[in-house]
Amino acid sequence: MAETERVYTIPLGVVKSVPIYRRSNRAMAEVRKYLARHMKTPAEDIKIDPGLNAAIWARGDSKPPLRVRVRAVKFEDGGVEAEFAGER
């Protein structure tokens, strides 16, 4: 099986349902959960690039973006690496 590379626009509107001081933490969890579902791999096998982390935390813990574009690469061993691919 060859490497699979895809670009996803991940909606993060669900983070508005948690307290304001936990929103970016929840956004990171939602990114991991979304990629686990769409790339068909366990959530613990997903590696998130520091650039994606910085993009979500750029405005602090209370104001993560409503959507984020992610480039995800799935390797033969089942691991996934996710990096920031732009705002929309």
Image (cartoon, helix red, strand yellow):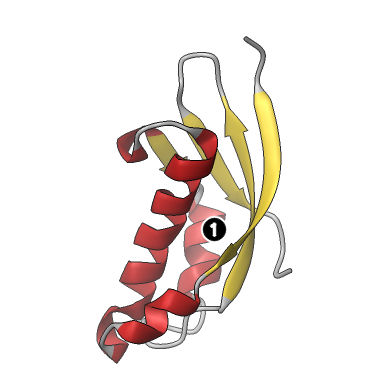
Q: Is residue 11 visible?
A: yes
Identify which residue is drawn at 61% across, 66% down. 68
Quadrant position of the N terminus in the picture = top right
Q: Could you say which is closer to the camera, residue 70 or residue 54?
A: 70
Q: Is residue 5 left or right of residue 74?
A: right
> x and y percent of residue 50 in the render?
49, 53
Identify which residue is drawn at 31% across, 37% down. 44
Identify which residue is drawn at 73% across, 69% down. 88
Q: Could you say which is closer to the camera, residue 57 or residue 23?
A: 23
> x and y percent of residue 16 in the render?
40, 85
Identify which residue is drawn at 50% across, 72% down. 12
Q: Could you say which is closer to the camera, residue 41 or residue 28?
A: 41
The image quarter containing residue 4 is top right
Where is 30 relative to 22, above or below?
Answer: above
How many marks overall? 1
Q: Is residue 13 left or right of residue 43?
A: right
Q: Which residue is mark 1?
A: 52
Where is 35 relative to 28, above or below?
Answer: above
Where is 5 relative to 33, above or below?
Answer: above
> x and y percent of residue 2 in the render?
67, 13
The image quarter containing residue 79 is top left
Mark 1, secondary structure of its residue: helix
Q: Is residue 48 visible?
A: no
Q: Residues within 10 Å of mark 1 (few under 14, many from 20)?
A: many
> x and y percent of residue 76 in the render?
54, 14
Q: Name the amino acid, label 1.
A: Leu
Q: Is residue 70 left or right of residue 17?
A: right
Where is 28 relative to 44, above or below?
Answer: below
